[in-house]
Amino acid sequence: MCSRWLRAALLGLALLGAAGTHAGVTAERTRVIFDGGMREASLALVNQNSYPVIVQAWIDEGHLDSAPQTAQAPIMPLPPVFRLNPGQQRSLRLLYTGEPLPSDRESLYWLNLYEIPPQSGETLAEGQSRLTVTLRTQMKVIYRPQALVKSAEEAPRQLVFRRIGSAVEVENPTAFFITLAGAEVRQGNAGSPLPAELLPPFSRRSLSPIQGLPVGGGEVRYLWIDDGGNSQQGSSPLR
């Protein structure tokens, strides 16, 4: 059965997903998995605003200060700029340029969707000003080499958790990017939540518990996000 913390985390993820479906330009899923051997993928977008918008799309390595003019990635979106009317749906094409990428692990890039609302035609009185609010959304684009496709589903269950002093070290021994949505160290009725973390392939991360760890032993119960954007549960002994 889920602990109280895990139930709260699952509810939070559900509420975040529900809230996202009512804001601006939204995508059919939260990430794009680009399987090796494919040259193209697609992503459906819909404008849920009550007004038309211009959308600018580009792919980069996740830097918040990046721009279409400076972004570099082996995957490019087409069209890079387009208009979406209220309620309109459009398919965005993502093309792999063929640039060589590691074959023994996944590569992660980020799709940026920059949403520009129309300018109001209303005349402003003297001394008044107008604020135009734009919205930028980022979502994961994961290139998965063809040799790894069949083993992706079991990767999150291979996470290893170790007690290192007052922190917990999580090791991802797999070739996959794993989105850890949250975790909790349990021992009997005691629990200590751990923060969410994106775990690159073959990496280790130190997680600082929100409160002190239980004394000795324990089990880590954790949530991760699968390819479809859904949360899944797992557990592992705390070593």
Image: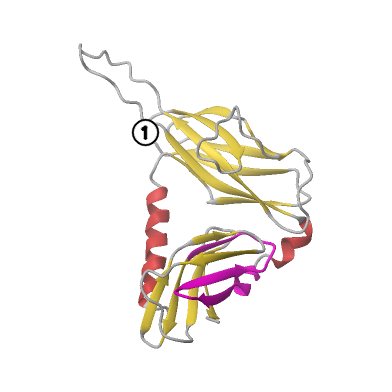
Residue at screen point 44% across, 78% down: 185
Q: Taking the image as drawn, is residue 194 in sight?
A: yes
* Residue placed under numbered mark 1 in the picture: 50
Task: State the SS at label 1.
Answer: loop
Is 38 on the left-hand or right-hand side of 86? right
Residue 217 position in % (x across, y down):
48, 86
Magenta part of the protein: which range?
154-181
Residue 48 position in % (x across, y down):
41, 39
Is 22 on the left-hand or right-hand side of 73? left
Q: Examine the structure image and report whether residue 149 is included in the region drawn in magenta.
A: no
Scheme of colours in the image: secondary structure
Q: Quadrant of residue 184?
A: bottom left
Q: Quadrant of the C terminus?
A: bottom right
Return the residue found at the far left. Answer: 126
Residue 226 position in % (x across, y down):
57, 62
Nearer the observer, 75 or 117? 75
Q: Looking at the picture, which amino acid does disc 1 mark?
A: Ser
Q: Taking the image as drawn, is residue 1 in sight?
A: no
Residue at screen point 31% across, 25% down: 131
**Looking at the image, is 121 positioned above or below residue 65?**
above
Residue at screen point 26% across, 19% down: 129
Q: Examine the structure image and report whether residue 172 is included in the region drawn in magenta.
A: yes
Is 140 on the left-hand or right-hand side of 176? left
Residue 53 position in % (x across, y down):
45, 29
Nearer the observer, 210 or 134? 210
Q: Quadrant of residue 10?
A: bottom left
